[in-house]
Amino acid sequence: MSEIIRASSDATEAARQSDQFAIALAAVHAAQQHHQHEQSACRHHGSPAPATSGGGGVKWLAVGMGGSALLLSVAVSAVAVAVSAVAVTVCLLILRSVLADVRKGR
């Protein structure tokens, strides 16, 4: 029976702590919004806006994906050039053989 009471008290304590965490998180969020509002209100005429580097991770992810797509297209193009070179070589060999047969009078 004491295990049930202990589990109940632990669950009550966890609920109280999660409520406190939610309040603290809301306070931090409100402070961030207030700070952003003050920054936008404090800009003077003629002074440039401060440079922000928001979305840095997304930017590098996009660069990586774009680079991968570029390298993939270069690789596919290289394969296409190689296949074309083999096809041209085979055609030239066949034409050479046909030309040799024509010269012999067959």
Image: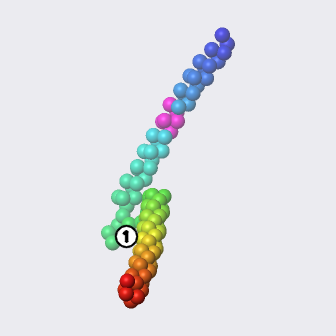
Q: Residue at x 47, y 59 (%)?
A: 61
Image quadrant containing the C terminus = bottom left
Res. 43 visible in picture = yes
Res. 53 visible in picture = no
Q: Quadrant of residue 53?
A: bottom left
Q: In this rendering, is residue 78 above or below 34?
A: below
User: Camera-side residue: 24 or 86?
Assistant: 86
> Which percent across, then down, holds residue 84?
41, 74
Q: In this rendering, is residue 2 above or below 42?
A: above
Image quadrant containing the N terminus = top right
User: Camera-side residue: 100 or 24?
Assistant: 100
Q: Quadrant of residue 4?
A: top right
Q: Amino acid at mark 1?
A: Pro
The stretch drawn in magenta includes residue 21:
yes
The residue singled out by tag 1 in the image is 48
> Which percent across, then down, holds residue 60?
48, 62
Q: Principal SS element in the magenta part? A: helix
Q: Residue at x 42, y 74 (%)?
A: 87
> Which percent across, then down, holds residue 86?
45, 75
Name the secondary structure under disc 1. loop
Q: Which residues are magenta?
A: 19-24
> Which percent across, then down, holds residue 19?
50, 31
* Image-based side of 98 in relation to 11, left or right: left
The stretch drawn in magenta includes residue 67:
no
User: Camera-side residue: 21 or 57?
Assistant: 57
Q: Residue at x 37, y 70 (%)?
A: 48
